[in-house]
Image: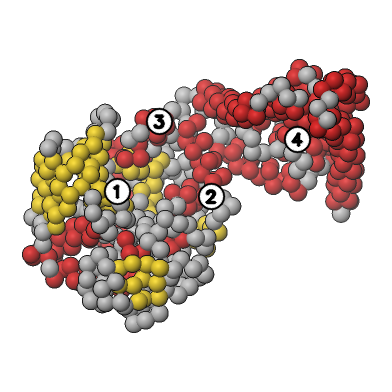
Amino acid sequence: MKKRWIEKAVLLLSLAGALFLFAFFLKDILIPLFTLQLKNDVEGAKALLTSKGIAGGAAVSLIEALQMIVVFIPAEFIQVASGLSYPFYISLILCDLGVCLGASIIFILVRTFRFDTKKSRESKEQIEQMALDNKEKKVWMLMYLLFITPIIPFGAICYFGSSTDIRYRRYILTVATGVIPSIVTSNLIGAGARAFIMNALPLWVLILIILLMMALLFVLLWLFLDKVYFRGKDGTPDSAAYFVAIKLIALWRKHSQKLVVDGEKLKGLDPPFVVLCNHVSFYDFYYMTELMKNYKPAYIINHHITSAPVLRHLSKKAGMIPKKMFYPDTAAVKMLRTLRAGYPVVVFPEGRLSIDGRPGEIVESAAAAYKKFGYPLVLAKITGGYFTYPKWRGKFYRGNVRIAVERVLTPEDLKRMSVGEIERVIEATLSYNASADPVNRFRQKDKARGLEKMLYRCADCGALYTTQSKASDLYCTACGKIHHLDDSYLFTDEIGSIPAYYDRIKETERAQLDDLELRTEVNVKVFPDKNGRVRKETGVCTLTKESFTYRSDKTEFTVPTEKIPALAFSCGKEFEIYYDNDQYYFYPTENRQQVARWSLIVDLIREERNRR
């Protein structure tokens, strides 16, 4: 109880002092400066800046120190304001002295009185997680990283450093030098703002300075991470590229998603191991990073994502494993190499996003490989995610999502089980139906938007490409039938659900499969396997039960359908295929609803072939 009163007293006194000094600083320096600017009194502004001298400088250092102690007062304000009011070199010294003063006070409070605050404890948890991820790194090196990273307040970093066994000399030297890049950036922005206020700098130059300073800070962060903190770790999940990617993903999604993570069954399991997870939405990668945040898994990712030079370079540095979808390649070899290096590997075995909220067939089962590898097999499942951002809708809806480890197969389990048994366990554990057990209620008024890109045929009259969406209704322009979606994404009439509607389309297509011949003119993008220049063509695609054919003025090839386990596609845009290691993206010139049909037909051909 006594400690809580001390904490409150220190906070109140610090806050009162900070408010007083803020008021002094604003009243005596900044507000008069802006007033003189409105009057275009440049000489008066210069006189003001030179008249405050020691008092203004003391205010800068004290405010900087107090914001360190209180933690939640942002340092950038006083740093920019200082750069606005004083020459750069003076501003830099004043801010750095203030940081060192605040850091010294924090050191005394923590080491002598075991003092901390709720805000510092919250930030400390984030820092300790980073320290846990990099146990071999020294405290001072981690503090340098945190000072350059514009995420955690300076004060929180100092509370963390003071709570370790670092010596004061090393601690204060790290603080004094570690904050310089951030202070320099803020001061230069302030100096640019001062020049702008005095009409010496155009607005576009000020904006350019701000962008350049932000870029400079990021470059310094990257160089420190890549050349110092994660030195020698390129090509693995211990690399700088991996660290930055995971942190950016967490920042991007963390506060826009209601996510429940259950990794209880992972406790006591040491890497390496393989993780399989269902693939329901565009944000599954984020969900998996949250489940695996105490580990550093490599991810099997779509090879096309790595086709751009920059992304190819970064994904390689991050230890990602590119996989050509539904096409044989060396991903399994790279996966085994990663496992042997001691890292977990995450796989989405469906290969493509769920189409209707049920799992796609695992057409490239690697059960035999997992059995041969001899590493634990972790089965995780995402529920509630499909309708938040499905394949056919271009808009995210906030909802409750849960990701949980459902089962772990040990090496002994895998050795005892047959390949068929392993496949059945994987399929049964990862099975789901988003419509059978709705997790969320969606009150948006445009729930059906984009649904016609997937439900391309009327389930009532069978007409082709006549479905359209409006608000929460899917309707047919041929027969006029309307199907309304309720807040659970269920149809309010006899058809019941999206999967039931999709099944009607499947049965209609299945009945016509023997006489099938699809043909469409397409615009084409070809991504060469050797990362050469992307070429564009126009041609014609034809699909029968026996083969897929593409012809253009430059290219002609035929692939037996038995060599096409599935067809990846983007709803209402394109479908894609690999041939001779090159990737072809086909964009129909008319009626792009049909891309979903091409994919479904390939699925039906495969199903019929598997039943023989």
Amino acid found under the numbered disc labelled 1? Tyr
Helix, strand or loop at label 4? It is helix
First in sequence: mark 4 or mark 3? 4
Name the amino acid, label 3.
Val
Mark 2 lies on residue: 253
Identify the residue position indicated by label 1 in the image.
Answer: 370
User: Contact (CB < 8 A) between labels 4 and 3?
Assistant: no
Of tags 1 and 2, the one toward the viewer is 2
Circle 4 sits on which residue? 77
Q: Earlier in the sequence, mark 3 or mark 1?
A: 3
Q: In this rendering, which labeled residue sits more in front, label 4 or label 3?
A: 4
Q: Nearer the viewer, mark 3 or mark 1?
A: 3
Measure the C-alpha gap from mark 4 to mark 2. 26 Å
Q: CA distance from mark 1 to mark 4?
A: 54 Å
Foreground disc of the pair 4, 2: 4
Q: Amino acid at mark 2?
A: Arg
Per the model, the C-alpha gap separating discs 1 and 2 is 32 Å
- Is 404 rendered above or below residue 310? below
**Residue 310 numbered mark, or none:** 3
Q: Considering only order in the chain, which callout, 2 or 1, is on the residue closer to the N terminus?
A: 2
Instruction: Locate the C terminus and report the quarter of the image it occupies.
Output: bottom left
Q: Is residue 164 visible?
A: no
Residue at horizontal 91%, vertical 21%?
51
Pick the residue in front: 427 or 506. Answer: 506
Pointer 1 and pointer 2: residues touching (CB < 8 Å)?
A: no
Residue 565, how many percent across, how many down?
19, 53
**In front: mark 1 or mark 4?**
4
